[in-house]
Amino acid sequence: MSQPDDQPLLPALGFAEELNEDERRSLGSFGEFITATEGDTIISEGQEQDSLFLIVFGTFHVQT
């Protein structure tokens, strides 16, 4: 299974710690990696979503 050079590999942390590299590549290929900086809004209250967000590195703040 190949992975584009610009597609990061899901790290072996948390739930993904039990997965091997091929499984993490496969799981990562279903999504999109984004980089957010402080102050960025990822999703707003009431906004329809068909996505699941996983925080790979860093922290986030929920504001209502």
Image (tube, rainbow, N blue to C red):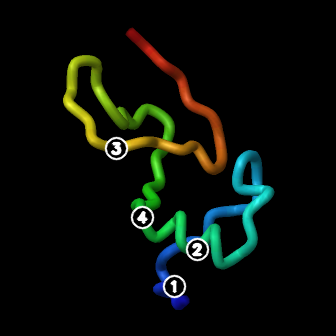
In this picture, is 58 found above or below 18?
above
Mark 1: which amino acid?
Answer: Gln
**Label 3, on which residue?**
51
- Horizontally, is 30 left or right of 47 in the view? right
Marks 3 & 2, CB-CB < 8 Å contact: no
**Label 4, on which residue?**
30
Pick the quarter of the image with the C terminus.
Answer: top left
> Badge 3: few (under 14), some or many (20 or more) residues near its Cα, within 10 Å?
few
Mark 2: which amino acid?
Answer: Arg
Residue found at x 70% / y 62%: 11
- Horizontally, is 2 left or right of 47 in the view? right
Mark 4: which amino acid?
Answer: Phe
> Badge 2: few (under 14), some or many (20 or more) residues near its Cα, within 10 Å?
some
Mark 3: which amino acid?
Answer: Ser
For marks 3 and 1 on the same chain, the one whose residue lies earlier in the sequence: 1
Q: How many marks?
A: 4
Q: Secondary structure at mark 2?
A: helix
Residue found at x 54% / y 89%: 1
Q: Secondary structure at mark 3?
A: loop
Mark 3 vs mark 1, CA separation in Å? 21 Å
Q: Secondary structure at mark 4?
A: loop
